[in-house]
Image (cartoon, helix red, strand yellow):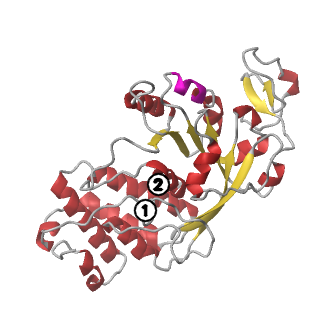
Amino acid sequence: MPFGGPLLSSFCHPPPHSLPPARWWRWCGPERKWLWERGESGKAAMAAGVPCALVASCSSTFTGDRLVQHILGTEDLAADTPANNGVRFYPWTIDNKYYSADINLCVVPNRFLVTAEIAEAVQAFIVCFDSTQKSGLDSVSSWLPLTEEWLPEVMILVCDRVSENGVNRPKAQEWCIQHGFELVELNPEELPEEDDDFPESTGVKRIIQALNANVWSNVVMKSERNQSFGLLSSLAGANCNIGSTENHHTEPHLPVGDGTECCFDRLDSASNTTDSQVDSIVDPMLDLDIQELASLTTGGGNLENFERLFSKLKEMKDKAATLPHEQRKLHAEKVAKAFWMAIGGDRDEIEGISSDEEN
């Protein structure tokens, strides 16, 4: 029985004494799961079917609202529908060169305030915890019965940084692997090396990246204008700036550098090699991958193609990550060039990313 489903009154039983009562919950059904009653709070915000990223905090020093401030890049937050029970909805338009989507960043003080409407709208879950406390993950684990029912595509565990005296990195990563979360440190002690071919984003920037990479239920695909070249730029290592001058929404820009990288991770273009060296790397499977990418990009901009595009790019990135350092650079250039040619691009237009050109 999914959360938010109809109550089976004939199967209702009292809840375990270990769980505090709340009017949103009933202990129902042969599955013995917590189910929501429909509550009044939050109906207005969810009436239009706007998906939400639920933001929770199990830390006494870092609130969910504070994390929303970082995500939106502003100190001045205005809740769209302030609720009497403390749940707050902050509207946010995700607008990048591939799609736009209107979502709510929904800050919920505790899990007993989750209504049926919120549960039905959750498509991402972000939870903060205090890594300086050895028991920091215990309170986060109390959310797991809900996330196991929601199964959101994006689940992120956030802390300031891991702590050797509290929850260290191995323990946090083990917990994340076990429960399907991604660990994000807002202020990691170690930053990715600048010469890394596949630099990992960190902090708030990574959270925004993950939310941009999600396929929201109300996503509106952009026109095909410049989409193909935009994807080529991502493969070749150019930055995709979310919130660029093309955007007509008044979203606050993010204080995380010159721009946010596109959800497609960068593949740096090669340096000091020749075209003949690039062409010498022949992989029949790579050619098939490139042809599939080309068809997905030049085809109709529907949701199924969009999901497959993300999946294929991740497959290609994982495959490239197994190559030696220099071959990864050659691989990146070969993919970019071959992809451009596969979608009918002019060879002259990609000379700028050639490895024998000085940057």
Residues at circles 2 and 1 in contact by the CB criterion of under 8 Å: yes
Where, by quadrant of the figure, is residue 284 drawn? bottom left
Instruction: Name the side, left or right, on which 81 lies relative to 289.
Output: right
Please rate how many residues cluster around mark 2, counting C-alpha atoms within 10 Å: few if below 14, some from 14 to 19, many from 20: many
Q: Residue 83's x, y, as percent?
A: 81, 46
Q: Judge by depth and name the residue closer to the eye, 39 or 292.
A: 39
Q: Amino acid type of disc 1?
A: Gly
Which residue shows up at 79% across the image and 50% down it? 82
**On screen, residue 119 above or below 166:** below
Identify residue for label 1: 257
Q: Is residue 219 visible?
A: no
Instruction: Name the side, left or right, on which 52 lies relative to 255.
Output: right
> What residue range appears in magenta?
135-140
Alpha carbon separation for disc pair 2 and 1:
9 Å
Quadrant of the image for the N terminus? top right
**On screen, residue 109 above or below 8:** below
Q: Is residue 342 visible?
A: yes
